[in-house]
Every structure is written in structure tokens, then in C-alpha cells.
Image: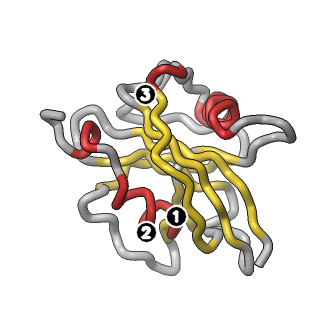
Amino acid sequence: MPEIRVSALVIGHPERRELLMVRKAGTQAFMLPGGKPEPGETARSAIIREVAEELHLELADDRLEELGTWTAAAANEAGHAVTGTVFAYRGVPGGLNVAAPEVYEEIAEAAWFSFDDLPADTPQRRFASLTRDHVIPHLPGWLTDPAG
């Protein structure tokens, strides 16, 4: 099965137990923000660049925590696997309008979703298995526990 390498970012809502997810134009799958590294680019550099392009957010490198790298079925490319190196961001990225996140480039929509009770997939809206099956079970304590 062909593999797609990506970098992805967990951004937690500052007041609720929710994650910011995005949906690309022409698709039904919500996923974490991010994208493919360019040749020679590190996963960390790729996530900083991709989030700047797609959400116009400024990420401070010292607030990024690498959570891990997982492989799952690709959400938008049938017959492909996606291997994602996932980072979590401590705090609110510069430029984020929490009430109404803005989107750019190929992103059609951004929305907050509960990581405690992610909605079931429907024909109109799905969630990337990388996020549902791998990232959510490995969220850092400082994100899932408000006292942490």
C-alpha cells in the first residue's frame, strides 16, 4: 500500500476539551491541521510551515511537543496509508481566532470537536483514523487535564 508522510498538529481549545480539526475542499474528512514535508524538510519544520500556510498561525518552536508517529488508512486517498508525525501545541498559537478559526489554501473548514466524545462518522462527515485511533488515545496530560 502506498504511504503518504505528513506532519500534524494538535491544538486544544483553551477552555473546553476539544481539538481543532480541518477539512480540505472537496472532502468530507476532518483531520488535524498539517501536511506533507517538502524534500529535505524535517517533520517539525513542516508543521510550522503548513500551519502558517493553511491557518495563518504562528507557532513558537519551544511550545511544540512531539507526541509520536503513527500509521493509519489515509482519510482522503483510497488505497493509501498515512504515516503522521504528530505534535501538540502548548497554549494558543499566535493569530488563532478561537471563536471562528480562519482557513486558507486548500482548507475549506476548521471546527472544534470533543476529544472525549468524537462524533460517529456519517456519509457527510468523517474523521481521520489517524486522529481517532492513534492521536486521541495519546494526548498529553497537560491537554486532557485542566489542572495539568
Foreground pick, 132 / 42: 42
Q: Where is residue 85 in the image (x, y as percent from the top left)?
A: 59, 49
Which mark sits nearer the N-terminus, 3 or 1?
Answer: 3
Provide the secondary structure element on which disc 2 rests: helix
The amino acid beneath tag 3 is Asn
- Residue 61 is marked as none
Circle 1 is placed at which residue position?
130
The answer for how far apart the CA atoms under marks 2 and 1 are is: 6 Å
- Residue 97 is marked as 3
Left or right: 121 as drawn, with respect to 50:
left
Q: Which of marks 3 and 2 is in front?
A: 2
Q: For residue 10, which quarter of the picture?
A: top left
Foreground pick, 94 / 43: 43
The answer for how far apart the CA atoms under marks 3 and 1 are is: 25 Å
The answer for how far apart the CA atoms under marks 3 and 2 are is: 28 Å
Q: Which residue is drawn at 65% across and 55% down?
A: 24
Foreground pick, 137 / 50: 137
Instruction: Evaluate if marks 3 and 2 touch, with contact meaning CB atoms under 8 Å apart.
Output: no
Provide the secondary structure element on which disc 1 rests: helix
Circle 2 is placed at which residue position?
133
Left or right: 1 as drawn, with respect to 14:
right
The amino acid beneath tag 2 is Asp
Q: Which of marks 3 and 1 is in front?
A: 1
Which mark sits nearer the N-terminus, 3 or 2?
Answer: 3
Q: Which residue is drawn at 32% across and 38% down?
A: 13
Left or right: 65 as drawn, with respect to 28:
left
